[in-house]
């Protein structure tokens, strides 16, 4: 796991603790939390890009020719996009789409399906799981929902609305912890954009 993976894991653990112990605080400040998480990820990714640039500049001649003044800066930035930045950039786009769907659809259908801060937790889970792990994240959430709803229905003998509020962050934590092993799955590796 790289430094960004450890940052994601730390953020998810802190958010999960806040969700369990300080929910009123989390609900009140969820927008600031999302902005803080996105900012922390952006700073970490810029720092890793800068470190890679300096490491390449200090490398022996074959590698140092991969950065300016020998090649355009766009070549280095494209290389960093495909190896590092796309994982979170694409996940940010996908999380924005899901956030919009989760905020708009329930209002249009006239039902309340989610807790007020749940769309933010979904978006954070997608962002911090990264690309392409958000595919597994949403799949695992669907399986979790089906199992939880089935178990709840069988135990209570009633059909009630079940909430996945307490599942979004733990599933993301599991995926971040398993990310080194998930890289070896061939069909998932086909969705990655770089090395």
Image (cartoon, rainbow, N blue to C red):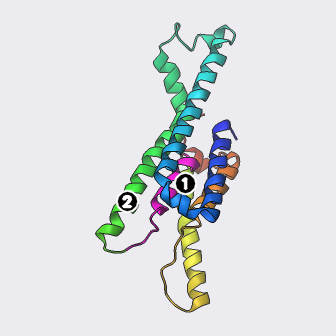
Q: Name the N-terminal-most of marks 2 and 1.
A: 2
Find the distance from the CA under tag 2 to the CA under tag 1: 15 Å
Name the residue rendered at 52%, 52% in the picture: 124
Q: Secondary structure at mark 2?
A: helix
Judged left or right of residue 147, residue 105 is left
Q: Main secondary structure of the magenta part?
A: helix
Q: Position of residue 139 (x, y in %)?
A: 54, 62
Name the residue rendered at 48%, 48% in the picture: 32
Residue under label 1: 125
Question: Quick one: 94 or 190, which is closer to the camera?
Answer: 94
Picture quarter with the N terminus: top right
Residue 114, quarter of picture: bottom left
State the residue lying farthest toward the bottom: 157
Q: Which mark is residue 73?
A: none
Q: Position of residue 14 (x, y in %)?
A: 65, 53
Name the residue rendered at 53%, 35% in the picture: 42
Residue under label 2: 101
Q: Which residues are magenta?
A: 112-130
């Amino acid at each position: 796991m790289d430094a960004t993976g450890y940052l994601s894991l730390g953020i998810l653990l802190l958010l999960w603790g806040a969700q369990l112990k300080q929910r009123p605080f989390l609900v009140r400040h969820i927008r600031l939390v999302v902005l803080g998480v996105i900012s922390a990820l952006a700073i970490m990714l810029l720092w890793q890009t800068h470190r890679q640039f300096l490491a390449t500049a200090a490398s022996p001649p074959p590698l140092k020719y991969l950065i300016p003044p020998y090649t355009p800066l766009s070549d280095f930035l494209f290389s960093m996009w495909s190896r590092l930045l796309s994982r979170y950039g694409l996940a940010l786009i996908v999380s924005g789409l899901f956030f919009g769907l989760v905020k708009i659809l329930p209002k249009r259908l006239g039902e309340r399906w989610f807790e007020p801060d749940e769309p933010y937790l979904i978006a954070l889970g997608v962002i911090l799981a990264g690309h392409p792990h958000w595919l597994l994240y949403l799949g695992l959430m669907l399986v979790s929902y089906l199992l939880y709803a089935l178990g709840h229905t069988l135990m209570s003998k009633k059909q009630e609305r079940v909430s996945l509020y307490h599942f979004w962050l733990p599933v993301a934590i599991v995926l971040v912890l398993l990310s080194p092993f998930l890289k070896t799955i061939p069909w998932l590796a086909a969705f990655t954009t770089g090395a």
